[in-house]
Image (cartoon, rainbow, N blue to C red):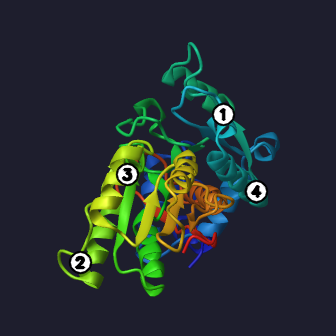
């Protein structure tokens, strides 16, 4: 079944059928209703790939040539990725994949002085930007502004409370992966030291994975108390080590705290891995001197672009009723600490 057959049945031209199926104002309501009814009765379904291609080709040439995704965040700086190696690697992954798909990225400052969400929406409309890549917010309870809610949006991480399509690290699986590695190497009393920020950022996935794994692998009551630290506080850390005597350590914290851990262990003459095996889960592990899991930022950036391109191709705009969440597993780094 095709458009020409429906046109013959309706007594109109094929172009009129095409316009009617696109709900064009150039076609009368009566003709639209007739065409839609015939399409339904004959089982006509358009080819999604052709529809997307034709929608793109109908745009003016200058619009097609500058097709881009806006890149935003709720941080106070215009380009937060320039101040963080972690975010820089994500942005590099975005840029590379966007280029492969025929898009360019345009950084836009959502919180520029004097900027309002309404004005920002006008800027996007002027520049024909209908897709946004978002680096999230320092406020985990941030709500996405209603003025921008009709766009296609993909955000990174879990920091925005509004249900959006998002890419995040697979925090739960990463913790299980690390525990399974240390257990295979013979560590029987692994403990978890968890940064307070990382606990919130992961929606408690690290602690949930640790407690669940210990119960099912080591047995009920064998998990050590989880030590939560805002930073790398020496006194509570050493007291925890002395009281619970872990033989292996799963350390989940920011890169700067990983460096402090290394310095503290050296200062206390705790020999790694001879006395204590250490597996680090962090944004950056390479070069830290520890073994562990480093977040795959390049892949996170690439997947964010792919997901946004798919949302636009499927005309999936607005706040999704069923948001799609894609989780990226981290990469294992051998650093000699196990």
Picture quarter containing residue 41? bottom left
**Residue drawn where x is 46% and y is 69% of the image:** 276
Query: Which residue in the protein does label 4 denote?
Result: 96
Tell me if 138 is positioned left or right of 84 in this view. Answer: left
Query: Which residue in the protein does label 2 denote?
Result: 215
- Report x, y in % for residue 24: 55, 47
Of labels 3 and 1, the one closer to you: 3
- First along the sequence among labels 3 and 4: 4
- First along the sequence among labels 2 and 4: 4
- Name the residue at the front extreme: 269
- First along the sequence among labels 1 and 4: 1
Q: Up-down: is 138 above or below 218?
A: above
- First along the sequence among labels 3 and 2: 2
Tell me, yes or no, whether the two marked residues, 3 and 2, touch with CB atoms within 8 Å.
Answer: no
Query: Which residue in the protein does label 3 denote?
Result: 237
Picture quarter containing residue 209? bottom left
Of labels 2 and 1, the one closer to you: 2
Assign a secondary structure to mark 1: loop
User: Alpha carbon of mark 2 to alpha carbon of mark 1: how far?
Assistant: 43 Å
Q: In which quarter of the image is the C terminus?
A: bottom right
Is disc 1 surrounded by few (<14), some (14 to 19) or many (20+) residues within 10 Å? some
Picture quarter containing residue 5? bottom right
């Amino acid at each position: 079944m095709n458009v020409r057959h429906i046109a013959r049945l309706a007594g109109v031209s094929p172009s009129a059928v095409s316009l009617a199926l696109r709900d064009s104002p150039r076609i009368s309501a009566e003709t639209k209703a007739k065409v839609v009814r015939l399409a339904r009765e004959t089982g006509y379904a358009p080819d999604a790939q052709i529809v997307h291609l034709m929608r793109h080709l109908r745009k003016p040439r200058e619009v097609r040539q500058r097709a881009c995704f806006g890149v935003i965040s709720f941080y106070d700086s215009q380009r937060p990725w320039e101040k963080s190696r972690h975010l820089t690697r994500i942005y590099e992954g975005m840029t590379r994949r966007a280029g492969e798909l025929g898009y360019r990225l345009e950084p836009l400052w959502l919180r520029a002085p004097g900027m309002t969400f309404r004005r920002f929406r006008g800027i996007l409309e002027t520049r024909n930007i209908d897709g946004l890549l978002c680096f999230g917010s320092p406020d985990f309870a941030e709500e996405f502004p209603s003025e921008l809610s009709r766009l296609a949006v993909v955000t990174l991480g879990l920091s925005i409370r509004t249900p959006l399509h998002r890419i995040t690290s697979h925090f739960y699986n990463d913790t299980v992966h690390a525990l399974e590695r240390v257990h295979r190497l013979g560590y029987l009393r692994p403990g978890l030291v968890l940064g307070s920020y990382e606990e919130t950022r992961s929606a408690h996935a690290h602690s949930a994975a640790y407690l669940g794994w210990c119960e099912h692998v080591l047995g009920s009551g064998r998990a050590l108390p989880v030590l939560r630290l805002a930073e790398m506080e020496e006194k509570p850390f050493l007291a925890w080590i002395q009281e619970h005597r872990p033989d292996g350590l799963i350390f989940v914290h920011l890169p700067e705290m990983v460096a402090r851990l290394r310095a503290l262990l050296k200062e206390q003459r705790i020999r790694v891995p001879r006395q204590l095996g250490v597996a680090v889960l962090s944004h950056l592990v390479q070069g830290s001197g520890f073994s562990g899991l480093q977040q795959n930022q390049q892949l996170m950036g690439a997947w964010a672009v792919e997901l946004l391109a798919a949302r636009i191709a499927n005309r999936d705009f607005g706040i999704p009723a069923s948001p799609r969440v894609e989780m990226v597993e981290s990469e294992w780094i051998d650093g000699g600490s196990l």
